[in-house]
């Protein structure tokens, strides 16, 4: 069974309040689909209209349309339009990537196999028939025991990957700021996944180092989980230190 993670303040988020209960139902259905099939947030264009059946539902005197609700999610940055379908905005910030889920499942299966080998079933009943000793564990299972620790270690070390910084941002100054960004995200329990890190590096690489640093500082200061361009940075970056660029609090994720 797969699990889909929701923040306990999800229902009060301004975006969710704006799309209403029906929009929220479609958004949750989208996330459940992604968790069930391990799509890392992707939903095929032909699949999304089938996730929730809104037939017969009337809202404000009008029949509810799946297409209309989908557009509402897009307009409020809850869904992103991508090639071949849609992407649940920030899905990998709140949910583990498919590769990690598969590795954890493999580790759990190996752990259960080891437990069964160490605790073979013994009969508690009395029989008049001739019985034999409890059969030996399957040689194939015994052979797989050394691999259990290896699989579990792979799961544990996924968060210990060596970060490969883009060439233009591979400086001590940027690394120090990025380290604070990763620490901040961990402190608010929104740990950065490798996929999210790559996406953010791709965005930041489009800007000069000082601008990229200002964007990260802006997000930390405002407690944002995403990274966004700083307004008027191009006209001001030569007049002020990058860390002084701030936007008003309250911006969406």
Image (spheres, rainbow, N blue to C red):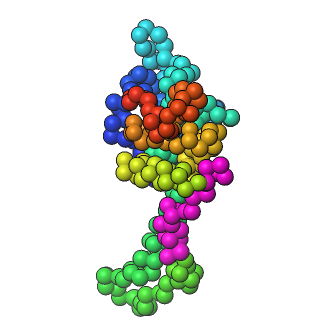
What are the residue bounds of the magenta stretch?
148-170
Q: Main secondary structure of the magenta part?
A: helix
The image shows residue 187 at horizontal and vertical percentages of 37, 51
Q: Residue at x 39, y 36 (%)?
A: 222
Can residue 31 be seen in the rendering of this structure? no
Task: Examine the image and state in which quarter residue 79 appears.
Answer: top right
Can you give x and y, in whole percent of width and height, for residue 84 in the image? Answer: 68, 35
Between 112 and 168, the residue placed more toward the observer is 168
The residue drawn where x is 48% and y is 50% is: 177
* Near-viewer residue (118 or 125): 118
Residue 159 within the segment the image draws in magenta? yes
| Residue 47 in the figure: left or right of residue 27 | right
* Number of marks in the rendered image: 0
Residue at the front extreme, as displayed:
239
User: Farthest residue in the right direction?
Assistant: 83
Towards the viewer: 1 or 240: 240
Check the picture and name the quadrant holding the C terminus: top left
Which residue is painted at 51% across and 64% down in the image?
160
Vertical side of 60 occupied by 203: above or below: below
- Residue 89 against residue 118 in the figure, above or below: above
Residue 205 in view: yes
Residue 102, position as x, y percentages in the image: 54, 59
Question: Is 41 placed left or right of 124 in the picture?
Answer: right
Percent of width and height locating residue 233:
55, 30
Whether the magenta-drawn stretch holds residue 127 is answered as no
Q: Residue at x 44, y 71 (%)?
A: 112
């Amino acid at each position: 069974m797969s699990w889909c993670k929701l923040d306990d303040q999800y229902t009060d988020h301004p975006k969710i309040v704006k799309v209403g209960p029906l929009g929220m139902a479609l958004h949750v259905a989208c996330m459940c689909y992604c968790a069930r099939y391990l799509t890392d947030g992707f939903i095929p264009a032909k699949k999304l209209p089938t996730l929730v059946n809104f037939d017969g539902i009337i809202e404000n005197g009008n029949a509810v349309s799946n297409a209309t609700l989908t557009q509402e999610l897009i307009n409020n940055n809850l869904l992103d339009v991508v090639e071949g379908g849609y992407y649940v905005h920030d899905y990998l910030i709140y949910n583990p990537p498919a590769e990690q889920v598969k590795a954890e499942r493999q580790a759990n299966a190996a752990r259960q196999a080891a437990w069964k080998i160490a605790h073979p079933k013994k009969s508690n009943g009395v029989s008049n028939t001739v019985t034999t000793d409890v059969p030996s564990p399957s040689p194939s299972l015994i052979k797989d025991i050394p691999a259990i620790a290896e699989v579990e270690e792979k799961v544990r070390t996924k968060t210990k990957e060596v970060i490969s910084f883009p060439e233009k941002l591979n400086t001590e100054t940027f690394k120090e700021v990025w380290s604070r960004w990763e620490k901040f995200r961990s402190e608010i329990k929104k740990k950065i996944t490798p996929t999210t890190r790559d996406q953010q590096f791709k965005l930041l690489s489009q800007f000069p180092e000082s601008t990229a640093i200002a964007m990260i500082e802006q997000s930390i200061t405002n407690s944002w989980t995403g990274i966004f361009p700083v307004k008027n940075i191009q006209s001001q970056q030569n007049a002020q230190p990058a860390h002084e660029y701030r936007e008003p609090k309250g911006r969406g994720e």
